[in-house]
Amino acid sequence: LIEAIMLNCQGLLVLTILTSLLPRTLPAKRCLQEEVMPEQKFFYHNNEQQKVTVLVNHRVSTRLVGSIFAIFAREMLGYHVETVLSDEIETDFDTETTFAKLSSCKNEFCKDLDDHPFNSRISSSQLKIPTAMISLDTWLPPSSFVDKWGLVDVGQLGPAGRFGWFIPSRTEKQYPPLKDH
């Protein structure tokens, strides 16, 4: 037991010495060097400063888009943006979990907001801050609607993907007629 304690103390001593040799603060490097740094801006909800958060998942492309947006928002717009990793999103097309993370509602169609104490619109002070505020890489099937979670679709970031089966035209000519089921 004494040997284990001595070994731990020696390790802590080495770690302390090494960290004292490092500079106290590392200079923050900017990606967009030529641009003028904007003044710091903040997002407020109920007069409280909130972090702007971007939802990302296990996909490298989603994390890349989220990181690039965070850099752009910080260096061009003046907002501090953090990415929120969601391990609960099981597939690339798990829109319900994504919507639940972005919404102030606890369930689909915001039924929980119907149970508030007043029989009028819910006040903003009663809304919870969602896990994330923005999702930049959500694949929506044509039948999906974001408004059932109290969200707003503000448009596409790029070309739309399309779900379907794609085959060469020679296959269609060789084996007509192909039916869409």
Image (cartoon, rainbow, N blue to C red):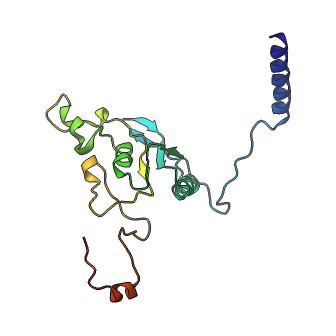
Q: Position of residue 178 (x, y in %)?
A: 28, 80
- Vertical position of residue 16 compared to residue 46: above or below: above
Q: In the rendered image of this protein, does residue 31 appear above or below residue 126? A: below
Q: Position of residue 132 (x, y in %)?
A: 43, 44
Quadrant (top left, top right, bottom left, bottom right) of the N terminus: top right
Q: Measuring from the top left, give residue 59's x and y in whole percent.
A: 52, 54
Picture residue at 53% right of the left edge, 56% below the top:
69
Q: Residue furthest left?
A: 119
x and y percent of residue 60 in the render?
A: 56, 56
Query: What residue is at 27 percent from the left and 40 percent from the top?
Result: 107
Say which quadrant the C terminus sits in. bottom left
Residue 88 is left or right of residue 82, and the answer is left
The residue shown at (31%, 50%) is: 151
Q: Is residue 75 visible?
A: yes
At horizontal 21% and vertical 39% (from top left) the residue drawn is: 111
Inspect this view and state whether residue 122 appears. Answer: no
Query: Count of labels shown?
Result: 0
User: With 16 as the anchor, is 156 left or right in this view?
Assistant: left
Q: Is residue 119 above or below residue 13?
A: below
Residue 146: quarter of image: bottom left
